[in-house]
Image (tube, helix red, strand yellow):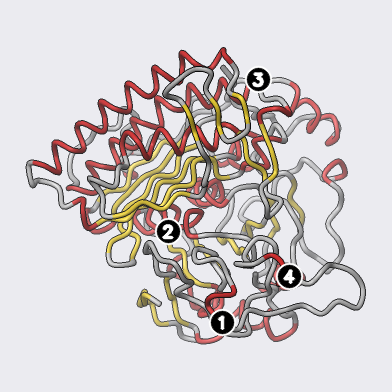
Amino acid sequence: MAVAREIRVGVACWALLLPWSCAAPAACVAARRARALPLRSQLLASAARGDSAGGGGAGGGAVTGLLELCKEACDELSVLVRLVYGGLSASEATLKADQSVFTIADGLVQHLLLTALLRDDVLGAVVGEEDARVNVATRPYTVDALNVPERLWAPIDTARARLAQLGARARAQHDAGAAPLRALTAFVDPIDGTREFSERLGEMCTVCIGLAEDGVPVGGLVYRPLTNPPTWAYGCAREGVARSRLLSRADSLSLATCAERPSECAPLPDLAECGDAPPPAGAQGLLASRGGVSAFVRALGHELPATLVRSGGAGNKALLLLEGAGACYIQDRGLFRWDTCAAQAVLEAHGGLLVKLSALAARGVAESYRYAKVDVQLDLEPGLARLTLHNAADVRSVPRSGAGNEVRYAQRADETKPYANVCGVCALAPSAAARLDEYAAAIGRARASHEMEIS
């Protein structure tokens, strides 16, 4: 099946990286969560990628200039994130209404970014995942009902002062008329992979900052603060900029919770039973969630064929694609615009792509989500997405789980949260983007035999 390549707008803790040589998978998981080990192989610093570990480098324009400031901000915030992660306790985390995890790191990182650097008096609009009340003006500091430990007060003050300096530089660019930043809308996920953060799998977590113009992602930064040193990628395709500091493929594969060759459609083994062997050399990797994997995703693994590689965080999986841990990433449920705006811009700048799964499956078209600050969903396809606690505008509309309860599908845009990705996601690594038509054909075959469980 031929695929139109047009993109239609319709858009103090260290790494926990373990070698593959651990004797027992269960012991690997326990050790991974219990202690920190140094990075064991070199970071990729390829001139072809335009790597600039210091955040500089030639080329770029207004968007690149802002991304460089965002990267410097994340360098500062990574110190604070490590301190939170190193001493995280039950009193510093809670569950939101949709049962997703929230920690003080989520609230602090977003608050510091939005009040100091990504201000709405410089940008056109800002959309952040969190809706927390943060007090870092008067001590004791708080994030909603969570008390910020006293050990974090001074690091917060340091980070706030440094980000204020970066914000002043952004405003100077804006005031000088050199940077048309008012046309941009920022989408921010302060800690993408909060559940992994709370489960001591912090190396899967990322800070995601995406920049959109006229509904289209034009620039993005995906930053892992808890690898040692931090790993990241940012880029702006229209300005010809793609910069990164990434893991080797071997270390990148170690971020997956398990890998399997999908030779039959059987339940995945428990985490403790997963083998440590990486996929065979040359095998195609299909990145998927650490949570439940749908029958459709399994069927796609057979159609490609591919090795299923499971890891947490949408931003993390975008970096895994750049690092060679997988060729394709499929997510049929649970994502939002702040998860994918930065990832899409980064992948496109590096030669990859991120598009709606539904459009690719049904029409063979690479179609982008629309990214704008709105009050209502812009990309609903009636009858496609299941209503869940994560995406429903009113959780009372979600049927209770259990035998005999029918699934409800969203028919109207106001039934879902405005920023829910209700069409699924397909992302391809730069090495796989030229084979988009092959992936579309495989997705179509998998869809013919197994319903896509989009939500």
**57 lies left or right of 362:** left
Q: How far apart are marks 4 and 1 (CA)?
A: 14 Å
Disc 4 or 1, which lies upstream in sequence?
4
Depicted 293 relative to depicted 130: above or below? below
Numbered disc in front, either 2 or 1? 1
Q: State the mark number for residue 87.
A: 3
> What residue sits right under mark 4 in the picture?
398
Q: How far separated are the C-alphas under marks 2 and 1?
A: 26 Å
Q: Which amino acid does label 1 sit on?
A: Arg
Distance, label 3 to label 4, CA atoms, is 36 Å
**Residue 286 position within the rendered picture, expressed as x and y whole percent measured from the top left:** 63, 60
Q: SS of the residue at dot 1?
A: loop
Q: Look at discs 2 and 3 and give the one toward the viewer.
A: 3
Position above or below: 379 against 337: below
> What amino acid does circle 2 point to?
Gln
- Residue 354 rendering spot, x and y as whole percentages: 46, 64
Name the residue type under label 3. Answer: Gly
Which residue is tagged 1? 412
* Neighbours of disc 3 within 10 Å: few (<14), some (14-19), many (20+): few
Q: Is mark 3 on a helix, strand or loop?
A: loop
Q: Find out whether the residues at labels 3 and 1 contact each other: C-beta distance under 8 Å.
A: no
